[in-house]
Image (spheres, rainbow, N blue to C red):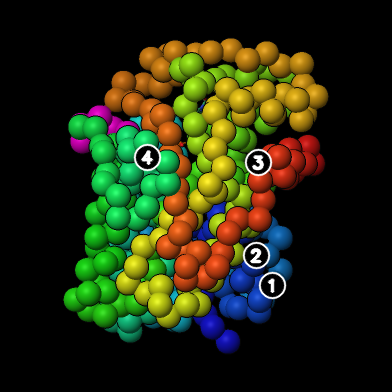
């Protein structure tokens, strides 16, 4: 039976991944420092004797080494990743995202453990191309604008992973996730879908930042997991990077309207200028539209859920 280590396994995507792999009969160890991950997310697995939770940090080199010694597969999802967190604690976010990944890769190197590296669509920065592909240029603002710290750190992580593959033969797979949403995601750190849903359900104003014309493509976490696990079981994915996202776009303003309609809420939309919504050092992206051709060619994966179904799932779980 495969021993799987999931860093960040108490987080939003990590806890769904833990659940899926446990259902598949795998033995799971979750390493999470509970900075943004939550005990609640993994509560229901605690009784399962295939599941083990270790509260600790990916910055703890000794602990990471020890856990990787017993692992056959690693899913490295732990990161400081929410816009709010990155703007409020930019230095610790940078350290976690760079040194944490380095620790995981260094530990994986000894036994060449297969390692999934979670990256992000932030990598592309301000590139507004419709159908961003993995080889497209990254357009980033000044590194001293804190928002770009995340994209910079994840860029370094990807390069580390790629070089551990090239130089040491560590079988890594990198995926750039585009706006993944679903049950258990919290709006606490700014993520737009859970935020709007909770505002709508509570009858609060829906806070659209800027003019709301910026667009995003939202992907349901279950579709993301299908892609991640397909990639990890495909030998041809090793050493490569893949976009995982939905090719259906919606503006943030339309998202707000849709959520109001679907929840039957009496909430109003309020437009908040960026300077009021975010601290200094913030620049928003106007658009982030993936091409998933590379992934499709290898695995025939396509997302199964469109925006209405995705929002239904988030709204239903928020109502529980
Ligand atoms: N956003 C918004 N109101 C909120 C939270 C976010 O209008 O209460 C906007 C945000 O400025 C961005 C988009 O929604 O344009 C997506 O934000 P999120 O933080 O979810 O993801 P990302 O910016 O990383 O795509």
* Comes first in the chain, label 3 or label 1: 1
Q: Are marks 1 and 2 in contact (CB under 8 Å)?
A: yes
User: Does residue 94 appear in the picture of this structure?
Assistant: no
Residue at (40, 22) in percent of width and height: 278
CA gap between label 4 and label 3 equals 21 Å
CA gap between label 3 and label 2 equals 23 Å
CA gap between label 3 and label 1 equals 27 Å
Picture disc at residue 129: 4
User: Does residue 302 appear in the picture of this structure?
Assistant: yes
Residue denoted by label 2: 19
Q: Quadrant of residue 173?
A: bottom left
Nearest to the observer: residue 20 or residue 70? 20
Q: Is mark 2 on a helix, strand or loop?
A: helix
Residue denoted by label 1: 23
Split into 4 quadrants, where in the image is the N terminus? bottom right
Of the two numbered discs 1 and 4 in the rendering, the one whose residue sits closer to the viewer? 4
Q: What element carries label 3?
A: helix
81 in magenta: no
- Report x, y in % for residue 25: 66, 79
Split into 4 quadrants, where in the image is the C terminus? top right
Graded by Cα atoms within 10 Å as few (under 14), some (14 to 19) or many (20 or more), the crowding at tag 2 reads some
* Comes first in the chain, label 4 or label 3: 4
* Comes first in the chain, label 3 or label 2: 2
Nearest to the observer: residue 151 or residue 303? 303
* Comes first in the chain, label 2 or label 4: 2
Nearest to the observer: residue 275 or residue 248? 248
Of the two numbered discs 4 and 3 in the rendering, the one whose residue sits closer to the viewer? 4
Residue denoted by label 3: 307
Q: Are marks 3 and 2 in contact (CB under 8 Å)?
A: no
Q: Is mark 4 on a helix, strand or loop?
A: loop
Q: Are marks 1 and 4 in contact (CB under 8 Å)?
A: no
Q: In which quarter of the image is residue 317?
A: top right
């Amino acid at each position: 039976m495969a021993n799987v280590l999931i860093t960040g396994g108490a987080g939003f995507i990590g806890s769904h991944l833990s659940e899926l792999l446990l259902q598949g009969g795998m033995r799971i160890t979750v390493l999470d420092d509970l900075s943004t991950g939550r005990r609640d997310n993994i509560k229901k697995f605690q009784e399962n004797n295939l599941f083990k939770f270790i509260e600790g940090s990916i910055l703890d080199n000794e602990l990471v080494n020890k856990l990787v010694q017993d692992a056959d597969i690693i899913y490295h999802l732990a990161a400081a990743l929410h816009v709010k967190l990155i703007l409020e604690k930019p230095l610790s976010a940078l350290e976690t995202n760079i040194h944490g990944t380095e620790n995981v890769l260094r530990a994986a190197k000894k036994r060449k453990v297969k390692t999934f590296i979670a990256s992000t669509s932030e990598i592309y920065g301000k590139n507004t191309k419709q159908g961003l592909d993995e080889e497209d240029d990254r357009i980033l603002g000044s590194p001293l604008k804190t928002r770009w710290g995340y994209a910079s750190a994840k860029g370094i992580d990807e390069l580390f992973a790629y070089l551990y593959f090239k130089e040491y033969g560590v079988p890594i797979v990198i995926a750039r996730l585009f706006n993944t949403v679903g049950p258990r995601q919290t709006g606490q750190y700014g993520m737009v879908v859970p935020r709007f849903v909770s505002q709508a359900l509570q009858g609060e104003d829906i806070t659209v930042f800027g003019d709301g014309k910026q667009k995003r493509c939202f992907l349901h976490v279950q579709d993301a997991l299908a892609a991640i696990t397909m990639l990890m079981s495909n030998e041809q994915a090793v050493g490569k990077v893949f976009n995982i996202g939905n090719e259906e776009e919606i503006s943030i303003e339309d998202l707000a309207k849709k959520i109001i309609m679907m929840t039957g809420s009496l909430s109003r939309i309020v437009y908040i200028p960026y300077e009021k919504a975010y601290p200094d050092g913030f620049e928003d992206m106007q658009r982030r539209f993936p091409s998933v051709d590379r992934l499709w060619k290898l695995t025939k994966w396509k997302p199964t859920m469109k925006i209405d179904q995705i929002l239904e799932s988030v709204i239903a779980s928020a109502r529980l």
